[in-house]
C-alpha cells in the first residue's frame, strides 16, 4: 500500500506538525502533500519522507505571504494527483480534508478544526469596517461554502478534542471520534528547582490566541509575562507590551521546557482547538489558567489542575490569575493529568480508527508500531 498524507502547509513546527510527525510512521509508505513548504522549517522526522507541494508554492512571496493566497487554497488541494495512492490521510485545519482520493481509496481525516477563520473565528480574523476586511470576508465565506460541500470526502473523521468534534457535527453534519494529539510527556517533565514569579504563554502570534488579553491582564496586575512565539501579531503585541512583558521566539525544546518548569503558571487566554502547550505545561508541573472554552475543557480540571474562567477580556483573565495565586496545586497531580495525552495513547486511537476504516496491510503495520 501507498499512502498520501495531506497536510495544509509546512512552514513551522507547531501543534499540527507534531501530529503529522506522529502519523507518518503509522501509515504504509507515506508521501506528504502540502500547499506550501519551507525546507528546514519542520522536523527531520517529517522531512525524511517525500514531500510534494502545490502550484502555490512556486508563486512569488509564498514563503511569507501564504495567507494572501486563501482564494486559491481549495483549488490547490484539489489539484493533487492522488490516483496512485491506496490510502489518504489528511491532517487538516484548513483545506487538507478536501483532497480528492481515487475511487475506492479510504480517506481518514484527522481534523484539528474546521477552517477557523471561515467559521467560528470569522469576526476575529476579519473584523468588519474596512474595504480590505470586506474582501477577505467574501473569500472566507466562499471557502466556508466549499468546506461544507466537501465534508463527505473523508470516510471518517478523528477530532483532536470534544469541542472540535462538536464543530464537525455542526458544520459538516458528520460524527467524529475524539483522539487527542500526542504530547511528549517523557520529555516535558518537572524540574527540581523552585518556581519563579512569572506567567508564561506559548503559541503562534495570531489573532485567535488573544495574547493581547494576556498583555492587558499582566499589566493590570503588575506581573511579569513571557510569551513564546512568532507570527503576524508580533508587532502589535510589542507595541502594547510594557517592561514587564517579554516576547521570545525560536526557543529550543530544552529552553521551552525550562520555562515551563520555572513559571508560576501557564496562561491560555483564547479558545484553543486542543492546547498541546497547556499539556506540556502540566507535564512540567505548572498549573494552567485557561478560557473555559474549546480544548481546555478536555485538559483542565478547575481548582485541581488549574483555573478556568468564562469572562472574556483582560479583566476575566486577571481575576483568574488572582484566584490561581490563592490556590495550592499538587505538582504530582498536575503531572499525572498530562499522561492521558501521551504518544502511546494517540497511537492506539489512530491505529484503531485506521484499522476500522481500511483493514488490510496498512492497519496491520500500524498495529505493530
Image (cartoon, grey):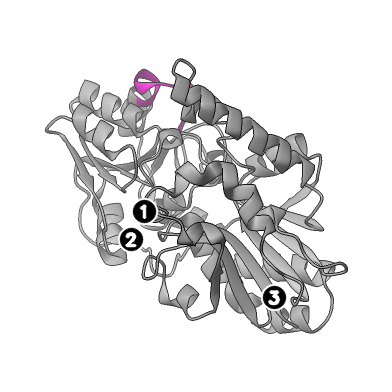
Q: Which residue does the image show at 32% across and 42% down from the upper left?
A: 265
Residue 162 is one of the magenta-drawn residues = no
Does label 3 or label 2 sit earlier along the sequence? 3
Q: Quadrant of residue 50?
A: bottom right
Q: Relative to the observer, which residue lies in front, 2 or 268?
A: 2
Q: Earlier in the sequence, mark 3 or mark 1?
A: 3
Q: Quadrant of the N terminus?
A: bottom right
Query: In screen coordinates, is 75 left or right of 357?
Result: left
Alpha-carbon distance for marks 3 and 1? Answer: 38 Å
Query: Which disc is residue 181 wearing?
Result: none
Mark 3 in CB contact with mark 2 (< 8 angstroms): no
Q: Give the percent coordinates (x, y) of residue 152.
A: 82, 50
SS category of the residue bearing label 1 = loop
Which residue does the image show at 74% across and 62% down from the upper left? 108
The picture places residue 177, in percent across and down from the top left corner, at 74, 53
**Near-viewer residue (326 or 201):** 201
In the image, residue 133 sits, relative to residue 18, either above or below, namely above
**Residue annotated with mark 1:** 285
Whether tag 2 and tag 1 are in contact, CB under 8 A, the answer is yes
Q: Which mark is residue 3?
A: 3
Residue range corresponding to the magenta coloring: 307-317
Question: Is 47 positioned to the left or the right of 155 in the image?
Answer: left
Quarter-of-image position of residue 116 = top right
Answer few, some or many: residues within 10 Å of disc 3's Cα (few below 14, many 20 plus, some between 14 and 19).
many
Q: Residue at x 40, y 39 (%)?
A: 206
Residue named by callout 2: 190
Label 2 to label 1, Cα distance in Å? 5 Å
In the rendered view of the protein, which quadrant contains the C terminus?
bottom right
Amino acid at each position: 500500500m501507498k499512502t498520501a498524507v495531506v497536510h495544509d502547509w509546512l512552514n513551522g513546527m507547531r501543534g499540527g506538525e507534531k501530529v503529522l510527525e506522529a502519523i507518518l510512521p503509522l501509515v504504509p509508505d507515506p508521501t506528504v502533500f502540502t500547499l506550501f513548504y519551507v525546507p528546514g522549517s519542520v522536523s527531520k522526522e517529517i522531512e525524511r519522507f517525500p514531500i510534494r507541494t502545490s502550484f502555490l508554492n512556486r508563486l512569488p512571496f509564498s514563503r511569507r505571504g501564504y495567507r494572501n493566497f486563501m482564494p486559491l487554497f481549495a483549488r490547490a488541494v484539489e489539484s493533487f494527483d492522488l490516483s496512485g495512492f491506496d490510502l489518504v490521510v489528511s491532517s487538516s485545519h484548513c483545506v487538507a480534508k478536501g483532497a480528492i482520493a481515487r475511487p475506492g481509496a479510504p480517506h481518514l481525516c484527522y481534523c484539528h478544526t474546521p477552517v477557523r477563520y471561515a467559521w467560528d473565528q470569522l469576526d476575529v480574523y476579519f473584523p468588519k469596517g474596512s474595504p480590505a476586511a470586506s474582501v477577505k470576508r467574501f473569500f472566507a465565506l466562499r471557502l466556508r461554502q466549499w468546506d461544507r460541500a466537501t465534508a463527505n470526502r473523508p470516510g471518517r473523521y478523528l477530532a483532536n478534542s470534544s469541542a472540535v468534534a462538536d464543530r464537525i457535527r455542526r458544520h459538516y453534519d458528520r460524527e467524529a471520534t475524539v483522539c487527542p494529539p500526542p504530547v511528549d510527556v517523557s520529555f516535558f517533565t518537572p524540574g527540581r528547582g523552585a518556581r519563579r514569579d512569572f506567567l508564561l504563554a506559548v503559541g503562534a502570534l495570531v489573532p485567535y490566541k488573544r495574547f493581547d488579553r494576556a498583555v492587558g491582564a499582566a499589566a493590570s496586575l503588575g506581573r511579569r509575562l513571557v510569551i513564546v512565539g512568532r507570527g503576524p501579531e508580533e508587532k502589535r503585541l510589542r507595541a502594547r507590551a510594557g517592561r514587564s512583558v517579554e516576547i521570545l521566539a525560536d526557543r529550543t525544546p530544552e529552553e521551552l521546557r525550562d520555562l515551563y518548569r520555572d513559571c508560576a503558571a501557564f496562561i491560555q487566554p483564547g479558545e484553543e482547538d486542543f492546547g498541546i502547550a497547556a499539556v506540556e505545561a502540566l507535564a512540567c508541573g505548572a498549573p494552567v489558567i485557561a478560557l473555559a472554552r474549546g480544548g481546555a475543557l478536555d485538559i483542565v480540571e478547575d481548582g485541581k489542575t488549574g483555573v478556568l474562567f468564562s469572562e472574556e477580556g483582560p479583566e476575566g483573565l486577571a481575576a483568574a490569575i488572582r484566584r490561581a495565586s490563592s490556590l495550592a496545586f499538587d505538582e504530582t497531580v498536575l503531572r499525572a493529568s498530562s499522561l492521558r495525552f501521551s504518544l502511546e495513547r494517540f497511537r492506539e486511537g489512530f491505529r484503531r480508527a485506521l484499522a476500522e476504516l481500511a483493514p488490510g496491510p496498512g492497519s496491520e503495520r500500524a498495529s505493530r508500531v
